[in-house]
Image (cartoon, rainbow, N blue to C red):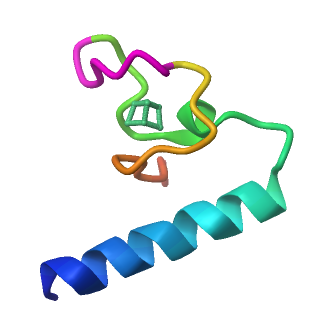
Amino acid sequence: MSKSKTTIWRRIRQWWWQKSCPSEFLCDNCRYDHPSACLRPERPNAVKCPDYVPNTM
Ligand code: SF4
């Protein structure tokens, strides 16, 4: 999959997640929600994040 398609799907996923759970932070369900995995200053309260990956486990 090309990089632009990946970005589009990521944005759609984020949009859908925010619509589904508007009161939750993305980090609560992100695979990278750990200090050694994510150095973003908005963690753990990000509501928008280009690196968000749903934690499916
Ligand atoms: S990558 Fe983004 S959504 Fe995931 S933990 Fe870091 S700041 Fe939160």
Give the extent of the magenta segment: 36-43
What type of secondary structure mainly makes up the magenta span? loop
Whole-percent x and y of residue 6? 28, 77
Instruction: In this rendered view, identify the residue nearer to me: 39 or 33.
Output: 39
Q: Is residue 56 left or right of residue 21?
A: left
Residue at the image position 61 percent from the left and 22 percent from the top: 45
Furthest toward the left, the residue is: 2
Q: Is residue 23 left or right of residue 39?
A: right
Q: Quadrant of the N terminus?
A: bottom left
Q: Count up the numbered dots.
A: 0
Whole-percent x and y of residue 8? 39, 79
Whole-percent x and y of residue 53? 40, 52
Image: 9 above or below 48: below
Image-quadrant location for residue 17? bottom right
Instruction: In this rendered view, identify the residue nearer to me: 27 or 11.
Output: 11
Residue at the image position 32 percent from the left and 11 percent from the top: 35
Q: Is residue 20 magenta-colored?
A: no
Image: 10 above or below 45: below
Image-quadrant location for residue 33? top left
Residue at the image position 68 percent from the left and 69 percent from the top: 16
Image-quadrant location for residue 47? top right
Image: 54 above or below 42: below
Figure quarter occupied by ligand 1: top left
Instruction: In this rendered view, identify the residue nearer to me: 49 or 37.
Output: 49
Furthest toward the top, the residue is: 35
Q: Is residue 41 magenta-colored?
A: yes
